[in-house]
Amino acid sequence: MPTDAERVVAISQKANGTLRIRPFYAMRTTLNLNEIIAEWISECDILSSTKRDYQRKIALWFRWLSARNLDTRSPERRHVLEYKQQLQTEGKSVYTINSLVTILKLFYGFCERHGYYDNIAVGIKSSKRHTEYCKLPLTAEQAFRLLDSIDTSSVIGRRDRLMISLMLFNGLRTCEVERIDIGDFSKREGEPVLYIQRKGRTDKNEIVVLHPSTVEWLEEYIADRNFHAEDPLFISHKRRCDNRLVRQTIGRIVKQRLARIGISHPKISAHSLRHTFGALMVEQGVDIETIKDMMGHSDTKTTRIYIEMAQQRKLLHHSPAKGVAELILNNGRNR
């Protein structure tokens, strides 16, 4: 007896003398889509903000199907490929496309495990992320100007200085900055450390060592706050609304701070601060395995991007081509 993934229905029509076969897909549950999605989300061991992100992204898929008058309970693999192709045509970033396709793999993987539906997205390859899509790092001089430009006479300024320093000095992602609670700061063998929750993790079992300036700026930021250890570190400081800053807001704040010092570029964002940390470590001669660990990468393939960045910067300012040109021209002058 064939498996669910192998079930096919013969279409009783011939094209050029051959019998055409297509996969047969149909939901094998009486649950409606909202109920299935709710069950899937509840099974995921992720943050509440990530759950909302999952719900938003899976809703985009079902809206896309509905807009094309396709049955949302019986989509096919070819529809996933068409969806991915349209995202590319619309000029969506490689990150966005891969993220939306990954959500389909997770959702239909859940459906397959529970016997609701086949995983129609399994095996669909992620789009390759070319280097031109990567965010650019800042120079050390630009990073200093960014920090130095912040007016710290207000609590907002002190908050932003601390937030940006953690991204520049420790390479934290915006989602990792978002999750910091006041009680996550501690000491290990006399060194000031911060326990962080890495991207895709649900616990805070990794530490980063803090620079003395970061510790000083932390103390200045929280000096006037009445807080508990479980309180979020970075909050909005709006009247009657001290909510935790989410990563989108953190990204917007960094972009605004960059614009104030004249840095406004589509390839420079909050993530550029993390790239700055990685690129400057390469320039200092730190080995790739150490950089991998400090960046929280699972594989050195990801870390190699910083080596490429450093190499491109080196070639930009010290191109061997200039030496070749000088050699040729000097040879002519000496005749």
Image: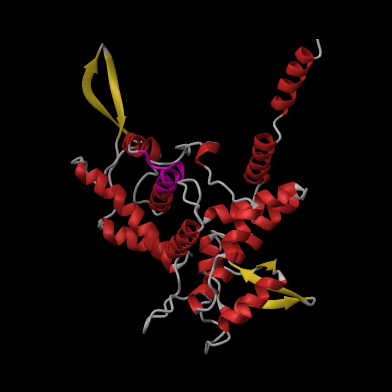
Image location (x, y in percent) of residue 172: 59, 61
Q: Eyeballing the image, is 166 above or below 229?
A: above
Q: Eyeballing the image, is 268 above or below 9?
A: below
- Which is nearer the eye, 251 or 313? 313
Q: Which residue extends farthest bottom?
A: 226
- Which is nearer the eye, 72 or 130? 130
Q: How is the image coloured?
A: secondary structure
Look at the image and tell me in which quarter the N terminus lies.
top left
Residue 300: name its quadrant.
top right
Residue 108 in magenta stretch? no
Left or right placement of residue 235 versus residue 131 in this view: left
Q: Residue at x 55, y 37 (%)?
A: 131
Image location (x, y in percent) of residue 192: 72, 75
- What is the tally of numbered marks visible in this picture? 0
Left or right placement of residue 224 versus residue 108 in this view: right
Q: Is residue 43 something that shows in the picture?
A: no
Q: Which residue extends farthest top?
A: 335
Q: Residue at x 69, y 38 (%)?
A: 314
- Which is nearer the eye, 147 or 134? 147
Q: Eyeballing the image, is 260 above or below 220?
A: above
Magenta span dominant secondary structure: helix
Instruction: Give the magenta part as a residue range.
Output: 91-101
Residue 100 in magenta stretch? yes
Image location (x, y in percent) of residue 28: 30, 50
Look at the image and tell me in which quarter the C terminus lies.
top right
